[in-house]
Amino acid sequence: MRIAVLLLAIVSLGWAAGPAVDFIQITDTHVVDLAEVHPALVKAREHFAKTGAAFERYLDGVAKPPRPAFLLHTGDIADAYCFDRAAGPAVCRGVEISKPILKRSPVPVYLTLGNHDIQAYRHEEGNPRLIADHSVAPRARAEWSKAAKSLRRGTYYSFRKRAGRTSYVFLVLDNGDRSLAKDSAFSAGQLAWLKKQVSANPKAALILVMHVPLGDDAYSGEIKSALADSDRVVLSIAGHRHSDAVEEIALGARRFTQVRTSAFGYGEGNWRRFRLLEDRIEIGAPGKPETQLTVPVSR
């Protein structure tokens, strides 16, 4: 009887809330192998030539305490899905070179596709500018889905984590292809899926994960519209802009926090720690374990 009363007291005081869930965000690694690539493209992208080795070193260190529960990669895993050669067919090994690096992770990795992951870099004689070609996106998505466990069900997906009595649902979007019209089949399917996820998780705390951060563009507006009926969106996590920021995003009459993290391809200290707790999310400063800000979460 005394044991039952003690257990009831512990639960009522919140002592049995359960452990926190720590994870690391990393983004814009831009892994690249420039062998056989057109010389003009090599010159333009060689600043990322050592990123793959840096990413390997980082993953090898993840096993050391404090070990996170998982890694969240918010896109531009590779610098491109394909590159033009000087002659002959394009070099398409963005997925191939990324896969063995990602396998080095001692913890699960949840991937988000970025614009570079689903594009080809083209070279046009007489044109000094790089040409980003997204016509390869369907092929790239198919190959990424076969290569990565987190993408097996598709390149937009959800997963769930629990901290005490709070269920967190991560809604991972594939929004790297900004050339997609909002009425395209892919875009419409993703937005319909997002609405269903919101309806199916009325009591969970929702965390958006995407490569391109929410902004004032048309597709961001479509995403916000899909979320408009929910008061459970607590956080958005993104990359793409190669800079760190904490922003407030308007969603109807309410606002929520969006966190951006700098490109790992520009520095091995560009990562960020998150900690899920029952009543809040603690967010680390870039490259440091210490908490930079706290986002409250209601049950």
Image (cartoon, grey):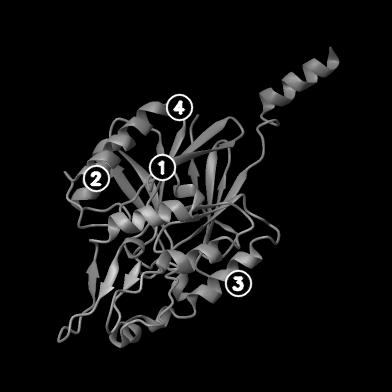
Gap in angstroms between the C-alphas marked 1 and 4:
18 Å
Q: Which residue is mark 4?
A: 203
| Among the two numbered marks 3 and 4 on one chain, the one whose residue lies closer to the N terminus | 3
Gap in angstroms between the C-alphas marked 2 and 4:
26 Å
In the visual, does 99 lie left or right of 17? left
- The amino acid pointed to by label 1 is Tyr
- The amino acid pointed to by label 4 is Lys
Secondary structure under the numbered disc 4 in the rendered image: loop
In the visual, does 191 lie left or right of 93? left
| Among the two numbered marks 1 and 2 on one chain, the one whose residue lies closer to the N terminus | 1
Gap in angstroms between the C-alphas marked 1 and 2:
14 Å
Q: Which residue is mark 2?
A: 187
Gap in angstroms between the C-alphas marked 3 and 4:
39 Å
Q: Which residue is mark 1?
A: 157
| Among the two numbered marks 3 and 2 on one chain, the one whose residue lies closer to the N terminus | 3
Q: Which residue is mark 3?
A: 57
Disc 3: CA contacts within 10 A as few (<14), some (14-19) or many (>=20): some
| Residue 243 versus residue 139 in the image, above or below | below
- The amino acid pointed to by label 2 is Ser
Image point 50% across, 29% down: which residue? 299
